[in-house]
Image: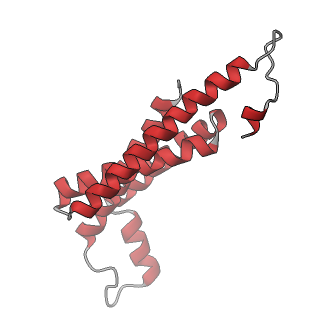
Amino acid sequence: MKYIPFILFTVATNAFAQLMLKHGMMQLGELAVPGVHPALRILQIVFQPWVFFGLCVFVVSMASHLFVLSKVDLSFAYPFLSLAYVLVAVLAWQLFGEDLNALRIGGIALICVGTVLIAQSGRQGQADTAEHADISGTKTISSSTLK
């Protein structure tokens, strides 16, 4: 499907935004600082460079996701976002030393298998739709389209 690269871009930017937010929050330390007004502390958090850049990348990710949603079915595009968990889990293990135990690896494998199945269903859906297009180029409704 021609929109898979856009979907994967959305996944990657979502994952990298999460990693930047985590790094920024690790650098900030305690959230509650005695003597600092909470509103001022929120501004300090938002404008911490890694947090701010992470939020900006997250906005790019959401814009990309909106583009994808304008082109493909939500039921096809949305499950791909689970790949962000895969990317975050592996990179958090490498960058932050987070735990990547057997249960998490098993869950990651299931996510990957599920995403491959969904990607295959998109190809199947394209073939079904192409078979049911009439000569004028408009799509006709069939039982497979309604599923």
Q: How is the image coloured?
A: secondary structure
133 relative to 16, above or below: above
Percent across and percent down for residue 95 are: 18, 55
Q: How many labels does the image show?
A: 0
103 relative to 33, above or below: above
Image-quadrant location for residue 104:
bottom left
Q: Which of 94 and 30 is in front in this view?
A: 94
Q: Residue furthest top?
A: 135
Percent across and percent down for residue 53 are: 37, 52
Q: Nearer the viewer, residue 18 or 128?
A: 128
Image-quadrant location for residue 20:
bottom left
100 relative to 141, above or below: below
Q: Residue at left 28%, top 80%? A: 30
Percent across and percent down for residue 123 are: 55, 27
Whether residue 102 sits left or right of residue 72 in the image: it is left
Q: Residue at left 43%, top 55%? A: 55
Q: Residue at left 45%, top 30%? A: 5
